[in-house]
Image (tube, coloured by chain):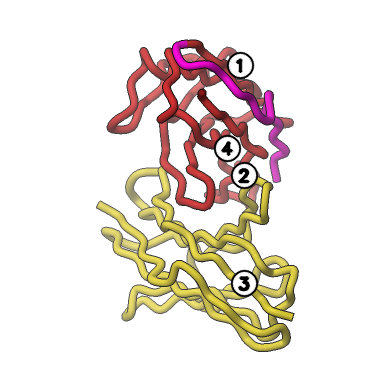
Amino acid sequence: AQSVAQPEDQVNVAEGNPLTVKCTYSVSGNPYLFWYVQYPNRGLQFLLKYITGDNLVKGSYGFEAEFNKSQTSFHLKKPSALVSDSALYFCAVRASGGSYIPTFGRGTSLIVHP
Amino acid sequence: SAVISQKPSRDICQRGTSLTIQCQVDSQVTMMFWYRQQPGQSLTLIATANQGSEATYESGFVIDKFPISRPNLTFSTLTVSNMSPEDSSIYLCSVEGGQAGTRYEQYFGPGTRLTVT
């Protein structure tokens, strides 16, 4: 079975400060990891993914995430937050050799204060 | 990336009635996914639909309640049957990227916001 944990329901950060949204996972075998973002009243958008290779992956809007196999984590980061980054963020995982269906975390609401 | 449209974008329905949600993709895809999302909450997969075969339903979802059609590689429908207020939710259609560089990524439609009274 595969699972994702996003331990924070909400993350608050001031504009211009770095942000981190946490994600840990559990999966049999090698993981494929994803971050998605959902802006208010809009559908989910793909942000970035880790499949293989460099542990640090870069995605849209200046976001990046670091795959840490020993800690089974895939935290989302951005060096300088913008008010427009305020949204709901979902982490997802699927096994590389198993089910093609990803499991989504419960989501973390990011609020960036001016 | 795939561009996905859904119709209707929202609807208010009476209990006991049915609503069919349409999902159109701008490219041919093998698998289409239907999710349900309570506002501000995570996604729950309802079923996976392959063209030319019966949809595969997740635990807790049955074909009689959520019949799905997949007549071709760019279109699918999800029907929410005999609705009750508990069916009030956002329904999302999704596909997986098939091009090199986009594999395994999922693309989502804008969603259908359903309210059952």
Tell me, yes or no, whether dots 3 and 4 are on the same chain. Answer: no
Q: Find out whether the residues at labels 4 and 2 contact each other: C-beta distance under 8 Å.
A: yes
Label 3: state its secondary structure: strand
**Residue A54 in sight in this render:** no
How far apart are the two marked residues, 2 and 1, measured between alpha carbons? 18 Å
The answer to whether residue A61 is left or right of residue A94 is right
Please tell me which of labels 4 and 1 falls first in the chain.
1
| Residue B86 in sight from this viewpoint | yes
Chain represented in red? B
Q: Which residue is mark 1?
A: B72
Circle 4 chain: B
List the residue tagged with mark 2. B107
**Res. A111 mark:** 3
Q: Residue at x 57, y 60 (%)?
A: A88
Q: Dot 4 corresponds to which residue?
A: B95
Subunit that carries the residue with mark 1:
B
Measured in 3D between alpha carbons, the distance from the residue under mark 3 to the one under mark 1, in whole angstroms, is 41 Å
Same-subunit check for callouts 2 and 1 = yes
Q: Residue at coordinates 33% horizontally, 21% vertically from top-left? A: B62
Could you tell me how far apart the alpha carbons at marks 4 and 1 are, in whole angstroms? 14 Å
> Magenta residues?
B1-16
Q: Is residue B62 above or below residue B108?
A: above
Residue A52 image position (x, y, % from top left): 48, 67
- C-alpha separation, residue under disc 3 versus residue under disc 2: 24 Å
Give the CA separation, mark 3 to mark 4. Answer: 29 Å
Q: Are marks 4 and 1 on the same chain?
A: yes
Helix, strand or loop under label 4:
strand
